[in-house]
Amino acid sequence: MQASLDLLITFVVQLFILVDPVGGAPVFLAITPHDSRAERRAMALRGCLVAGAVVCFFILAGPWVVAYFGIQTAAVRICGGILLFAIALEMLYGRISGTETSPGEEHLAEIKKDVSITPLAIPLLAGPGTIATALIFAGRTSDLLGYLALLIGTVVVFAAAFVILIKAELLTRVMGKLGTAVATRIMGLVLAFLAVQYVLDGLSAVLGKG
């Protein structure tokens, strides 16, 4: 039970850093410039539901997909760690990662009526880094309680993301550009440490078998 609780807490913290709704709030406002609060609320809800469903899919089906293609857990950790480190570097520079949204996607989103699926859910909320994290954590558990902890953690994170997105205007006024950039850099630093640890764990598993 304690192991599942520790897994839940660790997963929630890391997934929240990857989803980064605080850094994504200004982007959400930028891609919905002409929408009312009710429309933004509806799009935020759909976006969080879809992104959460994507993460849940990779938690439950990811290990099977990885095993089907003969990919070792160590490879997932190393590749995931490298990808997360690249995202962490972008966050340390105080900007949204290029693996999440591009200027072109944001420009197209500005003229779209509904941005809830793309680019909000994918790739802003559930980007490659988020999916890699789901795969890594799914590979760390094999019992029902562990999977349940990951699913609960996913619900918690995207519920928090929904609240932050619907309060995006208030959040950006309170924090300002400087506050948002500082928060993003701090989360990026933590993510960089985690990414390096994943690579080390993967390498240790490979060298240990050798």
Image (cartoon, rainbow, N blue to C red):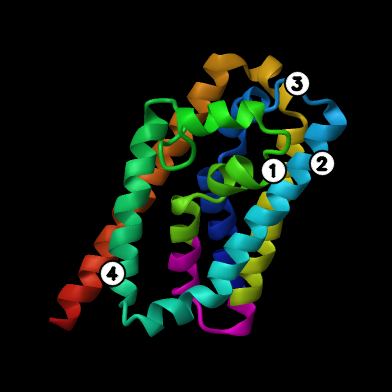
* Region of the chain picked out in magenta, as a range: 134-146
- Three-letter code, disc 4: Ala
Mark 2 burial class by Cα count in 10 Å: few <14, some 14-19, many 20+? some
Q: Which residue is mark 2?
A: 42
* Up/down of 128 relative to 98, above or below: below
Q: How far is disc 3 from disc 2 in space, using C-alphas?
A: 14 Å
> Which residue is the site of mark 4?
75
Q: Is 133 placed above or below 48 here?
A: below
Other-residue count near label 3 (Cα within 10 Å), few / some / many at <14 / 14–19 / ≥20 = few
Indicate left or right for 184 with 148 as reference.
left
Tell me the distance, in whole angstroms, between the alpha carbons under discs 1 and 4.
32 Å
Q: Earlier in the sequence, mark 3 or mark 4?
A: 3
* Chief SS of the magenta region: helix
Q: Residues within 10 Å of mark 4 (few under 14, many from 20)?
A: some
Q: Amino acid at mark 2?
A: Ala
Q: In the structure shown, which secondary structural element does the residue marked by tag 2 occupy? A: helix
The percent position of residue 130, horizontal first and vertical second, equals 50, 53
Q: 28 left or right of 17? A: right
Q: Which residue is mark 3?
A: 34
Instruction: Please state the horizontal and vertical placement of residue 15, each as a whole percent of the image.
Output: 55, 52
Q: Which disc is residue 116 wearing?
A: 1
On the question of residue 57 being in view, the answer is yes
Residue located at (31% from left, 82% from top): 70
> Residue 204 location in percent, x, y?
22, 70
Q: Amino acid at mark 1?
A: Ser
The reply to whether discs 3 and 2 touch (Cβ–Cβ < 8 Å) is no
Q: CA distance from mark 3 to mark 4?
A: 44 Å
Residue drawn 75% across the image and 49% down it? 46
Q: Earlier in the sequence, mark 3 or mark 2?
A: 3
On screen, residue 133 above or below 209? above
Q: Nearer the viewer, residue 30 or 172?
A: 30
Mark 3 vs mark 1, CA separation in Å? 15 Å
